[in-house]
Amino acid sequence: MPEIFSQHSRLKLNEPGNQILSWTWKHPVTEKNLEIIAGYDASDRFFSSGSYLMFPWVNRHTAHTIQLGEEFISLTELGTKDSKGYPSHGLAYSWRRRILDHTDHSLLLELIPDESIALTPLSKIRVREEYSLHTISDEEVLTLRTFFQNENTAPFRFCYGYHPYFRMNSKQPPTQLRSNIKKQIPLQEDLIPVYPIYGIETDVFELEQIPILDSLFFGGEPNVLLQVQSESYQVSIHSYANASNEIPLSYVQIYTDFPGNRIAIEPMSAPGNAVLHGFSLTTLLPEEEKSGCFQILLSTM
């Protein structure tokens, strides 16, 4: 079971490496051990806990075929479908990982493509994930960088994102949600974004309590802050791109699941259904490599 740690926190992945089993943090003031990620529960649905990769599309895709490279691939027998029958969360979420490098504070994994896509261009996209965990000043910083390299002879277009669940450890006083994001993207009743994409002003991040959400937001370098006042800590989910070959994760889907006292805050490089519309996709030329990165920062309040 892969594991990394910092001065105050410890992160564990499951044996295949495709889910976070736990991320626990010892509060430096109260010395309470707090569960930050709602860890993966193998007895429940794969998509209802932990944190997993969405690739080569994010959230929902409304067609039962998808163009990957120069080929159209049928999704009828691949992946998973939501309640509307839409293919959801990409194809790589449950692929096993192999460990390339492992230290106390960092872990480098490579995805092993599933045999079901072995003859498709998707199998020739080399994907690696690098987790690193450090205590920096008074913050715990978890950085997740994902690398994509195109080993096909033709360009490849895709989008990706992550779907972490965060534990809201109590409800009183209410947990608050704050962000620098100003734009919300309208969704249809089936939760598919309205195309052409446009944004509307939102006040979601100014409310005193977190409303019920399954909502999509956009920001240049989005930072979402989850403040758990009763436990005197806050979690910041921050995405950024510092170089021209970095993939910006400018979209955030936020989903609340109050029965489980959890909230999903999902950094993404594109909105749902983006591959079908050719919107906000990343293009990899043959032999080209690009990466994207987001961080989760813990601190006291």
Image (cartoon, helix red, strand yellow):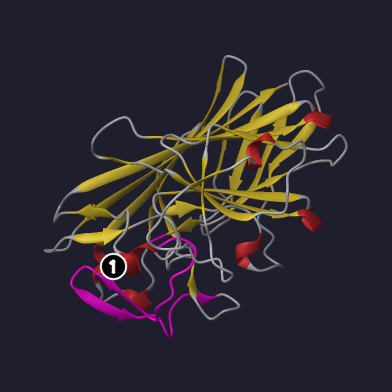
Which residue reaches farthest front? 200
Q: Is residue 151 magenta?
A: no
Which residue reaches farthest left? 153
Which residue reaches farthest top? 137
State the residue in front, 230 or 96.
230
Where residue 227 sits: x, y (%)?
A: 71, 32
Residue under the point 59% across and 69% down: 189
Q: Quick one: quadrant of the C terminus?
A: top right
Type of amino acid under label 1: Ser
- Mark 1 surroundings within 10 Å by alpha-carbon count, few (fewer than 14), some (14 through 19), many (20 or more): some
Q: Is residue 126 left or right of residue 152?
A: right
Residue under the point 61% across and 66% down: 46
226 up-or-down from 160: above or below: above
Q: Is residue 121 left or right of residue 15?
A: left
Which residue reaches farthest right? 172
Q: Which residues are magenta?
A: 55-81
Where residue 56 sits: x, y (%)?
A: 36, 62
144 up-or-down from 9: above or below: below
Where residue 69 sits: x, y (%)?
A: 21, 68
Of helix, strand and loop, which one carries label 1?
Answer: helix
Quadrant location of residue 91? bottom left
Main secondary-structure element of the magenta-colored stretch: loop
How many marks are shown on the rendered structure?
Answer: 1
Residue under the point 63% across and 40% down: 203
Quadrant location of residue 259? bottom right
Q: Is residue 57 magenta?
A: yes
Residue under the point 26% across and 78% down: 72
State the residue in front, 36 or 63.
63
96 up-or-down from 105: above or below: below
- Per the image, the residue denoted by label 1 is 123
Q: Is residue 242 left or right of residue 252?
A: left
Where residue 252 sits: x, y (%)?
A: 51, 47
